[in-house]
Image (spheres, grey):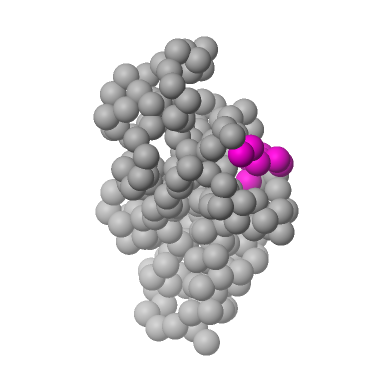
């Protein structure tokens, strides 16, 4: 793997894969990563950091990305595997898997942040890349919408935790519910404050 500067991108062909993750800082649920190769002949208006978009706008753009990009892929790592690997390695694994699943080989992979998985491609990490690079913005949107959809599924299994509202992040409401019910199997046991609990819910709360 060789890393390059942003100014070097123009030296390569225009098959650029953008990669980003969603859910790295959550207390529960999987971490997701997406990789997207946009079609320069069919630009998508409104791409931005997924966190700055409304859920309705993210869903709209997610459909456009899937329809208009040259190719895209999404990967995830479950909470139990996050505990086995640690969150950094789990995130890197999800990113790597998303790139390897692409049906088109990229000339260069642009990754949001300052860390990268081991890949046999030219790689560039870009801090704030989800705001600066359309392909990374698109990956951010796909990862976020797919993870939010999964958290809604988990809400159906564990409604008492209100995963539909906070999506597993450590909000005050989520912490209050953890204190009341204890964590479930979808909580990341290696994370604070989850690791401080000794009472784990073993059944679905309906």
Look at 65% across and 46% down and name the residue there: 51
- The image shows residue 130 at horizontal and vertical percentages of 59, 35
Quadrant that contains the N terminus: top left
Residue 94, compared with residue 41, is above or below; it is below
Residue 13 shows up from this direction: yes
Along the horizontal axis of the image, is 90 left or right of 161? left
Look at 54% across and 37% down and name the residue there: 39
Q: Residue furthest front?
A: 41
Along the horizontal axis of the image, is 39 left or right of 191? right
- The image shows residue 42 at horizontal and vertical percentages of 61, 39
Of the pair 103 and 19, the residue shown nearer to us = 103
Q: Residue furthest bottom?
A: 206
Q: Which residues are magenta?
A: 42-50
Look at 27% across and 29% down and name the residue there: 120
Of the pair 58 and 22, the residue shown nearer to us = 58
Of the pair 115 and 202, the residue shown nearer to us = 115
Along the horizontal axis of the image, is 171 left or right of 89? right
Residue 130 shows up from this direction: no
Look at 56% across and 70% down and name the residue there: 152
- Name the dominant secondary structure of the magenta segment: loop
Residue 57, compared with residue 70, is above or below; it is below
Q: Which quadrant of the view contains residue 177?
A: bottom right
Residue 156, compared with residue 58, is above or below; it is below
Q: Which quadrant of the view contains residue 160?
A: bottom right
- The image shows residue 81 at horizontal and vertical percentages of 30, 57
Tally of numbered discs: 0
Residue 48 covered by magenta stretch? yes
- The image shows residue 75 at horizontal and vertical percentages of 39, 53
Residue 175 covered by magenta stretch? no
């Amino acid at each position: 793997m060789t890393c390059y500067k942003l100014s070097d991108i123009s030296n390569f062909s225009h098959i650029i894969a953008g990669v980003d993750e969603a859910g790295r800082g959550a207390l529960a649920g999987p971490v997701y990563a997406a990789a997207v190769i946009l079609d320069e002949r069919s630009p998508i208006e409104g791409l931005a950091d997924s966190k700055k978009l409304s859920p309705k706008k993210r869903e709209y753009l997610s459909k456009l990305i899937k329809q208009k990009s040259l190719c895209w892929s999404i990967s995830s790592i479950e909470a139990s595997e996050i505990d086995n690997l640690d969150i950094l390695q789990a995130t890197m694994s999800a990113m790597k898997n998303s790139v390897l699943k692409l049906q088109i080989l990229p000339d260069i992979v642009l990754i949001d942040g300052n860390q990268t998985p081991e890949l046999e491609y030219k790689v560039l990490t870009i801090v704030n890349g989800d705001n600066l690079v359309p392909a990374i913005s698109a990956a951010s949107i796909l990862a976020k919408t797919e993870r939010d959809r999964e958290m809604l599924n988990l809400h159906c299994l564990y409604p008492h935790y209100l995963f539909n509202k906070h999506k597993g992040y450590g909000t005050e409401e989520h912490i209050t519910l953890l204190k009341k019910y204890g964590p479930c199997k979808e909580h990341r046991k290696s994370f604070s404050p989850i690791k401080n609990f000794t009472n784990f819910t073993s059944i679905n709360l309906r």
